[in-house]
Amino acid sequence: MKLYDSALSPFSRKCKIIISAKELDVEIVQVDKDGANGYASGDSPLGKVPCLERNYPEVSLYDSPLICEYLDALKDPWLPKGGEGRWKAYRMHRIGDGLSEAVYNYRYEIVRDEALHWSQIIERHETAIRNVVTYLDGIIQYVPTKWSFGSISVVCALDYADFRAGHIDWQALAPNLAKWHTGFKSLPEWAETYAYD
Ligand SMILES: N[C@@H](CCC(=O)N[C@@H](CS)C(=O)NCC(=O)O)C(=O)O
């Protein structure tokens, strides 16, 4: 199997944490942008990373929540099989992704020429970032302090927020979340997949 990857992508990083933690046999392939096609990410018509190419190219998987669920299921699944725990894990995974999306959208606004900046949209994304970290700060004591289907997404989003929207200083807004996040930095998979130096 091959994971089409770009080192800075928080969506791709979630997949790499699972691959590393579970020692899965997946080749990580760095891809470049291909103009209006997006990334040259295998046979994904979306042109986005990550994309997971399995043994049959016609059944590649795209969109990171789906790829994470597939990879997780290959060995000792973190995602609970059913019950409320499963919904909680999906929910945490998706709020982490939503944070990454808000940071990503913010970034795409501010890299335009200044004359094209749309201040209401920039403020919309910044507000979403602030609201999500404040919300997470209040519930983080219920979220596992080790890798799980939910925590991978939140950890990747927080590092990405630091990298692309550091002026928000999410740690100051969310001290409980900051403490929780710091606990992951000593895990080998964190350092191995961290690309924001
Ligand atoms: N919902 C997608 C989002 C993936 C995504 O937006 N990836 C970005 C990189 S962080 C990308 O490939 N952007 C290229 C483009 O849209 O042209 C997922 O979770 O996989």
Image (cartoon, rainbow, N blue to C red):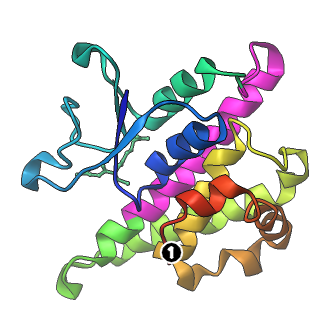
The x, y position of residue 152, in whole percent, is 65, 46
> Quick one: 107 or 64, which is closer to the camera?
64
Q: Quadrant of the N terminus?
A: top left
- Residue 155 shows up from this direction: no
Q: How many marks?
A: 1
Q: Residue furthest right?
A: 141
Up the image or down, 151 lies above or below 132; here it is above
**Residue at 59% of width from left, 45% of height from top?**
17
The x, y position of residue 48, in whole percent, is 28, 43
Alpha-carbon neighbours of circle 1 within 10 Å: few (<14), some, or many (≥20)?
some
Q: Is residue 179 left or right of residue 121?
A: right
Residue 99 belongs to the span the image colors magenta:
yes
Q: Which residues are magenta?
A: 78-105
> Quick one: 37 or 22, which is closer to the camera?
22
**Residue at 76% of width from left, 31% of height from top?**
88
The x, y position of residue 109, in whole percent, is 31, 71
Q: Please identify the dominant SS of the magenta region.
A: helix
- Residue 64 shows up from this direction: yes
**Residue at 56% of width from left, 56% of height from top?**
99
The x, y position of residue 16, in whole percent, is 52, 45
Residue position for label 1 = 163
Give the residue type at disc 1. Phe
- Quadrant of res 52: top left
> Quick one: 56 or 102, which is closer to the camera?
56
Residue 75 belongs to the span the image colors magenta:
no
Q: Secondary structure at mark 1?
A: helix
**Residue at 51% of width from left, 56% of height from top?**
100
Q: Is residue 101 left or right of residue 88?
A: left
